[in-house]
Amino acid sequence: MWMYVLAGLVCVTASCRRNAREWSDPTPQALLTGPYVLLTGPEKALIAFRNTSRENATVEWKTEQRGGSQAARRQGDRYWVNLTGLTRGDLITYVVKIGGLKAGEGSFRVGPAADDKSGRFAVFGDTRTNHQVHRAVIEALAKEKIDLFLHTGDMVERGGKPDQWVTFFQIERPLMAKAPILPAIGNHDIGNRGYYNSHFFLDKWAKNSSYYVTDWGNVRFISLDVTIVCVRCREYEFVVRALEEGAAYDKTMVMFLHNPPYSAGGHGSDLQLRSVLAPLAKKYGVELVVTGHDHHYERTKPIDGTTYIVSGSAGAPIRPVEPEDFTASARTEPHYVLIDADGDKLAIRSVNLRGEVFDSTTIPPNPPGGPPPPPPGEPK
């Protein structure tokens, strides 16, 4: 039976109010935005924040075994600290100080311990304009135990408007204080002033590219820009190398980006993107592809061993979805997705703002080349 509802077309929580585009931080902080954490490489992290007073800032961090203090570097009102040599498995707590006074704090891990193949990750996207729904998603997720979260893009309505980025980061503050963000760029995030790149400090760790790879234990996350449709271009070659390496080390692989190769929503399937990504997913054994862009929830049946999920209704206007033959589950209401990695399997739970799990499944390992065909006489 199709999980197809229109609950998201109307307010589903008390926080979904008429003036949904208005926002004022309910808990004003000394920092304009942040702090937040980006995983910038094996055993590395970047802690970032904005401080309009432009005073000197430091970040003090510690684990159970060790700690340190580091002066933040500054460009305008944007500050960052690069931490290296961090130990996987350790909980790292940190405090941001401005002029010697505490201004923010948080905690994170850079990965599981060497013998641990577990982890929990959250997914949501298209947060754009309904700030009350966006905040409700964040507050719900902040109560979950997660290791990191993926944003599938369209964080703001207009990427060239600086005030919209302030709103985005202030709304996300409760979640960013406890887990690193892995961003994917959406079409609404693009702007001539390059705020997306500057806020995520892509020049410091990703060669100023809006695509990158991050490993968490046995899971490899590959963030893509939709420009990958340029076959044999720089991004395509980067992704192929990341997939080849992941397959060689038998990684569980998750690709995430904004536009969906498979979608039964308003925008529909991006067929050009599908023609590039689907063969790569099959060849290298990608277990999961996560996207946004269409403002609904959808999970496909396994396609050559790969499951595709659309998660794009965490604040953008909800749109209806009409399931297609490839659809396994579809729903139209604000939500987030929890992914539990357990060895070489991924357990998926999709949750609405009432706390109800409305879809769940387990994604098994997907060997390179796709799953083997069923034995003769068995249904395909």
Image (cartoon, rainbow, N blue to C red):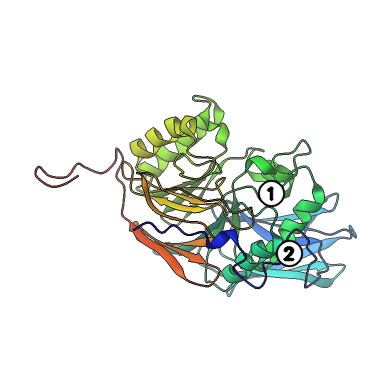
> Marks 1/2: CA distance?
31 Å
On screen, 90 above or below 248? Answer: below
- Location of the C terminus by quadrant is top left
Of 340 and 243, the residue lying toward us: 340
Q: Position of residue 220 (x, y in %)?
A: 45, 49
Q: Is residue 273 left or right of residue 198?
A: left
Residue 190 picture quarter: top right
What x and y, as percent, mark residue 96? 76, 67
Residue 200: mark: 1
The quadrant where residue 166 appears:
bottom right
User: Whole-percent x and y of residue 249?
Assistant: 36, 46
The N terminus sits in image quarter: bottom left
**Residue occupying image coordinates x 53% and y 32%:** 228
Q: Nearer the viewer, mark 1 or mark 2?
A: 2
**Kind of residue sitting beneath label 2:** Arg
Reading the image, the residue beneath label 2 is: 18
